[in-house]
Amino acid sequence: MMETFLSKVTLVKLRKDILLLLTGLLLLLMVNGCAQQAVKCTSPEDNREHHYVQGMEAIEKEQYDSALSKFEGSVYCDERYSPAYSGMAIANANIADKLKDPEFKQTKFNSALKFLDLADKLTKTHEEEFAYYTAKIRVLTIIKSSDWLAQASSAYNAGKRLDVYENKLDYYEGKEAIDYFMGIAYFKGLDFNRSADAFKAVLNAKREGKWNQKADVMWKRLDKVVRAMSGITVGDVGKKIALKDEISRADLVALLIDELKLDKLFAGRIPVKSELNKMEAEFTPADIMNNRFKDEIMTILKWKVRGLEPIYDQTTKASLFMPDQPVKRGEMALILEDVLIKLIHDDSLATKFFGNERSQFPDIRPTSPVYNAAMNMTTRNIMEGELSGEFRPNDSVNGAEALLAIRVLEQTMNIH
């Protein structure tokens, strides 16, 4: 009996020893796993902050897929790092904004909102909260859901109240960043007074700050938009086009026909009505069949405005209008020059500045096809160059620039 009792005691003790050993091994494995997780991203080029900043810089360059890859690298280093998810939200919103399929667009927008919600839940510091609130403003400005501007304004006020260390704002670098992005939100929401106040706050914050030059550019653009929209009646296509970062060929046609009343002007300069009745476009390009500005495009094709002719497409082996193609400043100069020539019946304008040995613009040679047009437009103040003297012929035309140019053309011709 005694031996049986001792053997039972020994067995119980052995079981306890084994249990303790297994528990110790399990704890060792957990500690080792945590240690491995903690040290998996330690080099200067491989840590959560570095990948996050690279992702945000990729967004600046509109390289959204690359940005998502960088943010994934940041999450790999720390899956609970809130700013990485804020960045994912911004990238997804931008990707969605460029999609044309409504279903795909909404799916991407939903992804952006989910990442934004996750970023909110994972914030641990005021600096991470700042990144979240700024991202929320940026995402809402793109999505423009119901009551988006009020929601963005609430995020702005919350972000402004935060007490942050600017040297810990890895990407934004200064609190004025949230003023800049709220300025854009107000701009997109047509609240121009508040937009101006926000950009002014950025300009007053730091003379050499990261967001100073960007705010200065937007301040000047805001001034152009306000001037451009001053004569537009509510409901005109011009009001919708005014805020565009770049206008398409179809947008420009709509402005010429609807704002400038070009068809009426041209028709008024043809004395014989029978000739006017015969005029029509040679054909209808296949790519404008479902375009909302189809009628305007057909009208402009009827008048054969230089720079707005059909373009031969090598892929389809057909002449297309390419309505969604952005208009460059050099192209805009050619188009408006031709409109001016047709209105005043002065063909000599087309060669007025030919033969100049020295260009008036550092970025256009006197032999360039757009040089004469650029000179005609700037000498008549229809289009503006830069203070540096550059014309920027290859830059896209934004909505405000286009409207102002057409407004000055109207005034020059005393059209209305």
Image (cartoon, rainbow, N blue to C red):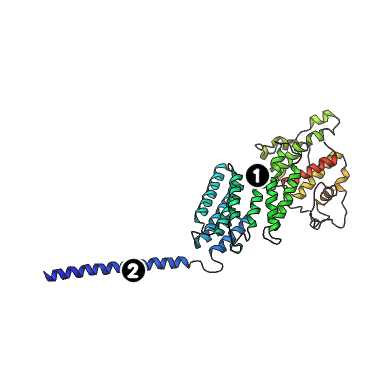
Residue found 53% across the figure and 59% down from its top: 125
Q: Which residue is mark 2?
A: 24
Circle 1: residue type: Gly
Q: Position of residue 104 (x, y in %)?
A: 55, 45
- Measured as percent of width and height from the top left, residue 17 is found at 27, 69
Residue located at (81% from left, 46% from top): 382
Question: In the rendered image, is residue 90 in sight?
Answer: no
Q: Residue at x 85, y 40 (%)?
A: 413
Does residue 89 appear in the picture of this structure? Answer: yes
Category of crowding for the residue at label 2, using alpha-carbon neighbours closer than 10 angstroms: few (below 14), some (14–19), many (at least 20): few
**298 or 186: which is nearer to us?**
186
Figure label count: 2
Question: Label 1, label 2: how many angstroms apart (C-alpha)?
Answer: 61 Å
Nearer the observer, 23 or 73: 23
Front one among 41 and 391 = 41
**Element at label 1:** loop
- Residue 209, above or below 21: above
Give left or right: position of 59 versus 321.
left
Where is residue 166 shown, x and y percent of the image?
A: 61, 62
Q: Quadrant of the N terminus?
A: bottom left
Instruction: Identify the image quadrant of the C terminus.
Output: top right
Percent position of residue 94, x then y: 60, 50
Q: Which residue occupies the extreme top position in the image?
A: 274
Q: Quadrant of residue 16?
A: bottom left
Q: What residue is pinned by disc 1? A: 189
- Residue type at numbered disc 2: Gly
Q: Which mark is residue 388?
A: none
123 lies left or right of 367: left
Q: Indicate which disc, 1 or 2, sits on the residue closer to the N terminus.
A: 2
| Closer-to-camera residue (45/329) | 45
